[in-house]
Amino acid sequence: MTLLRLTRAIKLAAVPALIASLLSGCSGLDTLNAMLLAQDHPVAAGIAYGPDARQKLDVHRPADGPADGPADGAAHPVVVFFYGGGWKGGERGQYAFVAEALVRHGYVVVVPDYRLYPAVQFPAFIEDGAKAVRWVRENIRAYGGDPERLFIAGHSAGAHLGAMLAVNGDYLRAEGVQPDSVKGFVGLAGPYAFDPSDYKSTRDIFASAKHIRDTQPVNFVTPAAPPMALLHGAGDGTVYPLNSQELAKALRKNSVPVRHIEYPETGHIEILLAFYPALAGIPLIEDVVGALQDFEGGSLSARR
């Protein structure tokens, strides 16, 4: 066994324990970031997009231009990534691995924090997402990003947040942003069609909603929705694959381009960890980047 294979084997051996720590709310992502990240790209950290302590974001960008953006006017496409955590936890700094994977493919990546339960209930965290998108639209050129090539991505609760911004234009319009500013959405293991009143863990978070249907992105799909790539682990027992299946069905019914991929024997956390190249047992990064490129080229197809 080569040294490289031995090192990777050691890292992979630690994954089950790290998955367990992630599922229990511990800082397994901090451990993985320390182990596996190159961290060789510029990061502008802790930028406020609102007055609350949780309304801050980090901007990750490729290291190919001056700090205030490319001098020649060229700019990179932008991905706003919303992390998960059951609407109760999460810190933007733990998701540097997602940003690094996309920065290496030429994207400026924005990772916002947002307010969480019990400090707030639905829809405050979605409103925070809209505020973060507004900040990106107004400021990202200074960081080498192109606000006209803006995409949203997310995992789990963050995919729910991002999908809601993509399909319910009221949130963005409330911040003075036109919904068609979002050119595409990539969702990983999102709970797009679940009923939060069915689960003790989410019942109180969404108790403020007048109607349950108002909490479900699947109910807001229209032909005006942006193209989407919906990626899910077939073995996900936390957010069932049915959620992506139902959203894909609604998109097709409205003639919205959608690519729906299910990865065999992949769970809720494993799909996220695949952003680490050293741990990727599925072609997640290739599928995410391929979808983003196809969004720009207008060539998103239903299948890989």
Image: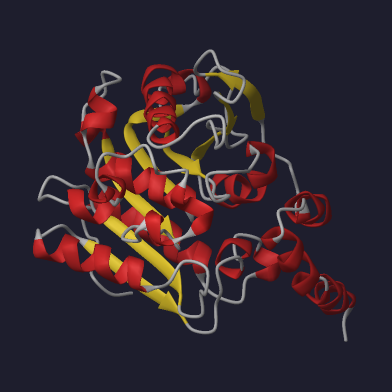
Residue at the spot x=15%, y=57% of the render? 256
Q: Is residue 92 above or below residue 71?
A: below
Instruction: Return the x and y of residue 18 as percentages of the image width and height.
Output: 77, 65
In the rendered image, the quadrant that contains the N terminus is: bottom right
Q: Is residue 302 left or right of residue 267?
A: left
Is residue 214 in view? yes
Of residue 97 and residue 173, the one placed in the foreground of this image is: 173
Q: Is residue 193 left or right of residue 101?
A: left
Q: Is residue 134 left or right of residue 10?
A: left
Number of numbered labels in the structure image:
0
Instruction: Return the x and y of residue 282 as percentages of the image width and height.
Output: 55, 75
In the rendered image, the quadrant that contains the C terminus is: bottom left
**Quadrant of the image occupied by residue 247:** bottom left
Q: Is residue 111 above or below residue 286?
A: above
Residue at the spot x=40%, y=55% of the render? 196
- Colouring convention used in this rendered image of the protein: secondary structure
Instruction: Return the x and y of residue 94 as percentages of the image width and height.
Output: 69, 44
Instruction: Return the x and y of residue 24 as percentages of the image width and height.
Output: 72, 59
Of residue 45 and residue 253, the one placed in the foreground of this image is: 253
Residue at the spot x=22%, y=33% of the render? 179
Residue at the spot x=52%, y=68% of the render? 238
The residue furthest top is: 51
Of residue 123 and residue 294, the one placed in the foreground of this image is: 123
Is residue 154 in view? no
Of residue 153 and residue 217, the one placed in the foreground of this image is: 217
